[in-house]
Amino acid sequence: MEPITTTVIVTLAFTKFLETSVEKFTEAGLQKMDELRQKIWAKLGSNAKAETLC
């Protein structure tokens, strides 16, 4: 069995940090995209000309 080196510890910590960051970013990004979609839908929903183009 190999001894745990500082590099391995740092790599594991960075990997976990990266996974958590990506997960939070994805969650926040999806929420923002949904908010934007709702705003666009609300604006276009009252525009009859926009509805006929869809």
Image: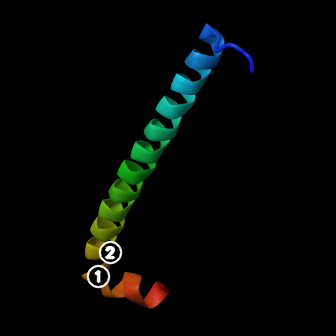
Compare residues 49 and 42 and report the one nearer the observer.
42
> How many tags in the picture?
2
| Position of residue 29 measured from the top left corner of the image (x, y, whole percent) | 40, 51
What's the amino acid at mark 2?
A: Trp
Q: Is residue 54 above or below residue 42?
A: below
For this view, does 31 lie left or right of residue 42?
Answer: right
| Position of residue 36 measured from the top left corner of the image (x, y, whole percent) | 33, 61
Q: Is residue 48 above or below residue 39?
A: below
Mark 2, other Cα within 10 Å: few <14 / some 14–19 / many ≥20: few
Q: Which residue is mark 1?
A: 45
Mark 1, other Cα within 10 Å: few <14 / some 14–19 / many ≥20: few
Mark 1 → mark 2, Cα distance in angstroms = 6 Å
Toward the bottom, the furthest residue is 52
**Residue at 47% in and 30% down:** 17
Toward the top, the furthest residue is 6
Q: Secondary structure at mark 2?
A: helix
Q: Which residue is mark 2?
A: 41
**Residue at 36% in and 67% down:** 37
What's the amino acid at mark 1?
A: Gly
